[in-house]
Image (cartoon, rainbow, N blue to C red):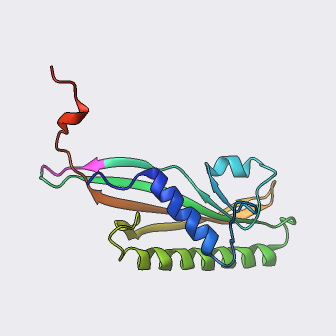
Amino acid sequence: MQGVKFSALVAYFRKLATEHVEIRHSESDKHFYRFELEEILMGLNNVKYPAMILEGYKFDYTDNKSDNPVKNRQGAFVLMDVVNDPGDYDKIHDLWDRMEEIGDDILARIKADKRNPGSPVRDFDLSSVDGSLIASEIAGHYGIRFTFTINCRYNFNVNPDRWIAG
């Protein structure tokens, strides 16, 4: 098993954004985005809120000199909304509470979906999740960034079809 492809994770997180009652992403009313957080914080104007942003991931391998190497994918998603008055701390705190609740809903859904053998989050490590409050007072963006890890067994057997015989 080579593990989950990034495109499958994108489709899965888009589905979560589509089905969550507060995000309500659709093709005509986009609330799901695939890019880096910095692009949002730099003031993209056509983002609709609340927004769910799936960042790209990085990965590494763990071998431990065994026959069961593991591919460790570290990724992140951000839940974000806007408060126009950076001095309105009550509204900012309410927004953070709301984003945390949506994040909890998403993590509960991921935990449930892990039971499906074909799920792209089958190897999602819930204990790896970290949440961090984010704020960009200039643009009025506030939210929470959730980091996560997906660990999956990785087959390092050589596939002869992928090589020119020489």
Give the prevailing secondary structure in the magenta stretch: loop
Residue at the (20%, 39%) spot, across then down: 159
Query: Where is residue 102, by image quadrant?
Result: bottom right
Hey, which residue is sitting farthest top in the picture? 166
Q: Quadrant of the C terminus?
A: top left
Q: Is residue 97 above or below residue 57?
A: below
Residue at the (67%, 79%) spot, across then down: 21
Res. 40 in view: yes
Q: Position of residue 103 (x, y in %)?
A: 58, 74
Query: Where is residue 157, by image quadrant?
Result: top left
Q: Position of residue 117 (x, y in %)?
A: 32, 71
Q: Is residue 65 above or below residue 160?
A: below
Q: What is the magenta range?
A: 61-65
- Along the viewing direction, whichever of 60 and 164 lies nearer the viewer: 164
In the image, is residue 118 part of the stretch drawn in magenta? no
Hey, which residue is sitting farthest left in the picture? 66
In-image side of 60 versus 129 (left or right): left
Q: Quadrant of the N terminus?
A: bottom left
Res. 146 in view: no
- Along the viewing direction, whichever of 27 and 101 lies nearer the viewer: 27
Q: Position of residue 135 (x, y in %)?
A: 71, 61
- Along the viewing direction, whichever of 139 and 160 lies nearer the viewer: 160
In-image side of 92 versus 166 (left or right): right
